Image (spheres, rainbow, N blue to C red):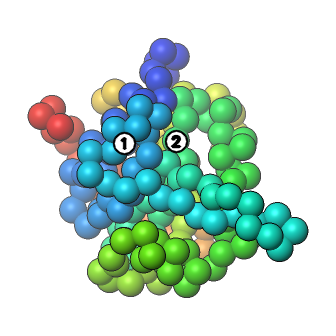
């Protein structure tokens, strides 16, 4: 059962704690609503309108698992993610993997290994809408962690995401984080 009063900040904290405990996950950037990144940079991706630079998109979380780069948007409820899903789709329609890794490298991110794929992701506390089929989705509640991979994610990435799912769903919480 979803807890309707779980805030976006709580989802950020729960997700970061869970991912920090998974061997092979490297957190590269984090931008929670409370602005407490605890040493991780904010990730900014240049955006363009009509072939002109139009500011930057701020990504909530950036990480790698094995050789997959994952850019993630986080909200309290899945129904609040419409603009975030559109933002990630806009980023992926303009930037390919090489472009994204170059942008992140200019922001001080170092990759080891170099990512071979990039996957968009969303994380939410309350599941109250349909989920995008081309995204990795994390349903996060205190004590409840589910990973759902959209059926349109390329098969070459699906095996890595299956390993991530096993680790994500079975990792124990560390109460000291």
Asked whether residue 6 appears in the rendered view, the answer is: yes
Taking 148 as reference, is 28 above or below it? Answer: below
User: Can you give x and y, in whole percent of width and height, for residue 89 in the image?
Assistant: 70, 60
Tell me which label, 2 or 1, sits earlier in the chain: 1
In the image, farthest residue toward the left: 176
Q: Does the rendering let one see residue 160?
A: no
Q: Quadrant of residue 57?
A: bottom right
Looking at the image, residue 47 sits to the left or right of residue 107; the answer is right
Asked if the residues shown at circle 2 and circle 1 are in contact, with their CB atoms under 8 angstroms apart, the answer is: yes
Residue drawn 65% across the image and 39% down it: 81
Q: How many marks?
A: 2
Which residue lies under the disc numbered 1? 15
Pointer 2: what residue? 74
Residue drawn at the location 52% of the way across and 74% of the way down: 103
- The reply, left or right, for residue 45 in relation to residue 94 is left
State whether residue 160 is above or below residue 1: below
Q: Nearer the viewer, residue 68 or 58?
A: 58
For label 2, the SS is strand
Residue shown at the point (40%, 50%) measured from the top left: 30
Q: Secondary structure at mark 1?
A: helix
Place of residue 154 in the rendered image (x, y in percent of width and height, measured from the top left): 60, 74
Percent x, y of residue 136: 54, 56
Real-space Cα separation, disc 2 to disc 1, in angstroms: 9 Å
The image quarter containing residue 53 is bottom right
């Amino acid at each position: 059962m979803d807890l309707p009063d779980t805030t976006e900040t709580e989802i950020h904290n729960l997700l970061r704690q869970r991912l920090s405990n998974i061997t092979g996950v490297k957190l590269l950037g984090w931008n929670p609503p409370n602005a407490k990144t605890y040493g991780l940079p904010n990730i900014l991706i240049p955006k363009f309108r009509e072939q002109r630079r139009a500011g930057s998109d701020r990504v909530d979380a950036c990480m790698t698992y094995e050789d997959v780069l994952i850019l993630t948007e986080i909200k309290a409820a899945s129904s609040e993610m419409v603009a975030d899903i559109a933002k990630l789709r806009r980023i992926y329609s303009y930037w390919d993997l090489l472009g994204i890794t170059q942008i992140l490298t200019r922001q001080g991110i170092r990759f080891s290994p170099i990512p071979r794929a990039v996957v968009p992701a969303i994380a939410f506390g309350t599941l109250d809408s349909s989920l995008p089929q081309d995204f990795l989705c994390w349903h996060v509640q205190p004590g409840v962690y589910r990973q759902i991979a959209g059926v349109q994610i390329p098969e070459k990435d699906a095996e890595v995401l299956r390993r991530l799912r096993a680790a994500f769903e079975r990792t124990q919480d560390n109460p000291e984080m």
